[in-house]
Amino acid sequence: MASSTALICDTEAWKDLKGHVEDINKTHLRDLMSDANRCQSMMMEFDGLLLDYSRQRATVETMDKLLNLAKAAQLTEKISRMFSGDHINSTENRSVLHAALRAPKDAVIKADGKNVVPEVWNVLDKIKDFSEKIRSGSWVGATGKPLKDVVAVGIGGSFLGPLFVHTAIQTDPEALESAKGRQLRFLANIDPVDVARNINGLNPETTLVVVVSKTFTTAETMLNARTLREWITTALGASAVAKHMVAVSTNLALVEKFGIDPNNAFAFWDWVGGRYSVCSAVGVLPLSLQYGFSVVEKFLKGASSIDQHFQSTPFEKNIPVLLGLLSVWNVSFLGYPARAILPYSQALEKFAPHIQQVSMESNGKGVSIDGLPLPYETGEIDFGEPGTNGQHSFYQLIHQGRVIPCDFIGIVKSQQPVYLKGEVVSNHDELMSNFFAQPDALAYGKTPEQLQKENVSENLIPHKTFSGNRPSLSLLLPELTAYSVGQLLAIYEHRVAVQGFVWGINSFDQWGVELGKVLATQVRKQLHSSRTQGTALEGFNYSTTTLLKRYLETSSEPQI
Ligand code: F6P
C-alpha cells in the first residue's frame, strides 16, 4: 500500500502493470473479441445503462491488476473521504461535495461537521419558487411584461455544464413541451461578438439576466454582466435591475455590491468546484427557468443514482471506477495521450466541451497532491463531436493514424424519431448503425489478405489496410431524458475523480489557470494608459511589444 507521500509508480501494483504491457502487446483485439467469456465479463449494467468495455486492450488479468492498483492507491479510502466531507482539496483546504447537491432531502452529508443537505434544499426550494413565479408570469419585468427569455452570463464551469444539459434535454418531448414560448441563452466569451449574438432579437423588457459566477470576480463574466446591466438600464432605467437581474454565486457580498438584490441571489458553497457546479444553482436556476423545476429535479435524481452506485458498488462492477481505471491503463501504461468522446446523439453535442473542462482542468497536473514532481503523465487530451459528424471529419486519423481510445455513447430510443416510408431503416436506426459499426472497425481493422481476396489492386493495398487493435468502449443509454443526462454527467465526474485518486494528484484545484490571468491584468493596464494618456509600451518582451504596438496603432477600438 502506498504511504501518503509515496508515488503510485513506486508500488508493486504499478510495476506489475508496466510488465503486463508486454503481454498485452502480443494480443490483438481481433482475437480478444473472439473470447465470449472475456467479453461477457466486460459488460456492466446499472439502472438502465449498459457499459461494454470488451474492446479495451485488456484481458481479465489486466482488470485484476488494475483492481490491485486501485487498492495500492487506497481508492476505497479516498472515495469515502470525499463523501465524508474531508478537505481532500488540500491546496484550497476545501471539501469536495458536489454529490451533496443532488442528494435526497433526508440524506446526511457533512462538511466541517455540519449537515449540508438542508442548505442545499433551501436553495433548491427557493429556485423552485422563483422559477415558478417567472414561468407563470406572476413575477413581471419593469414595464409589467412577463419575462420569457433568460440570458445566463458565466464562463467555464459556470457555463459549460448548464449549456451541456440544456442542449441535451431541449429536444426531449417533456422538456420541449415545458419550455414552449421561452428561450435560454448563454453568454460566456468576453468577445463583444458574443454579447451581440446573445442579445440579438431579445427585448430587455421581457429578458431576465442570470449572472453566474462562483467567485463573482471573473473578469469576463463581470464585464459581460456590466454590459448587460447597461443594456437593461439604458432601455428601462436603473431601477429595472431589481426585476431583470439575478445572480448565482458563493460570494453574496459581491453580488450585493454589483447592485443585485441579495434576495434575488442563489447561493452555493466553496465545497462545490466550478466545473462540478452544474447541479448547484449554477445549472438548476437557468434550467428550471427554461424547463420548470420538476424536469431539472429528474436530472438531479439521475446524478444521485450514480453517486450511490459509485459509493456502494464493488469496484469490479462499479462503472465510474472501471472507466477511471481503464483510462489510467490507456494513458499511463499503453501511452495513449488522448481520448475521443463520441456521442451518437446530436443532443449530446456539448458533452465533449463540458468533459474537456471536467477532465482536463481536474487532471492536467504536474505534481502529486503532496507537491512531488510526477515522473508520469496525468490527464488526457479530451475532444469529441457527435457521430456521424466526426466520422466525416477526424475519424480518418483515428482509424489509420494515431491510436485514440474512443468512448462511443449511444441512445436506444430517439428523442425525435423519424421514419420515412420506403426507407430501409428509420433515421435513428441509420444513426445507430454507425454507433455499432465503428467500434468493430477500430478493433478488427482490415488485413492485406482480406483486401487481396477482394481483388483490390496491389498499389492500393497499403492505403486500404486498417491495422485495427484500436481500443474503444460503448455506453448505451435507454433514452436521453433529464434523468439519464444526470447519470451520464455523474459517471464522467466520478471517473475523473478515480483517475486523479489513482494518479495521486489533487483533481479539485486549478492553479494552472492563474498565470495567464495575471499577465492579462498587466496588458489591460497598459492598454488603458496607452489609450488614455498615450503611455509608451513598457515591461513586455520584443514579441509582445511588437504585437501590442501593431494592435494599438491600427485598431479602431472606441476611445475611452
Ligand atoms: O478558468 C478558471 C475558473 O476558475 C474555472 O475553474 C471556473 O469554472 C471558471 O473560472 C469560472 O469561475 P467563476 O464561476 O468564479 O466565475
Image (cartoon, rainbow, N blue to C red):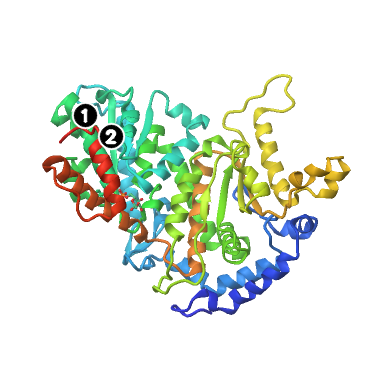
Give amino acid for label 2: Val
Tag 1 near tag 2, CB within 8 Å: yes
Secondary structure of the residue carrying numbered label 2: strand
- The answer, for residue 246, to whether it is visible in the render is no
Disc 1: which residue: 232
Of residues 167 and 406, the one drawn nearer to the viewer in this rendering: 406
Q: Position of residue 234 (x, y in %)?
A: 17, 26
Give amino acid for label 1: Ile
Is the CB atom of the residue marked by disc 1 within 8 angstroms of ligand 1's nearest atom?
no
Residue pictured at 70% horizontal, 37% vertical? 433
Drawn side of residue 70 relative to residue 19, left or right = left
Secondary structure of the residue carrying numbered label 1: helix
- Alpha carbon separation for disc pair 1 and 2: 9 Å
Residue pictured at 55% horizontal, 38% vertical? 480
Q: Position of residue 290 (x, y in %)?
A: 39, 32
Q: Is residue 290 above or below residue 356?
A: above
Q: Position of residue 274 (x, y in %)?
A: 36, 52
Residue pictured at 23% horizontal, 40% vertical? 552
Disc 2: which residue: 209
Drawn side of residue 339 relative to residue 209, left or right = right
Crowd around label 2: few <14 · some 14–19 · many ≥20 (10 Å): many
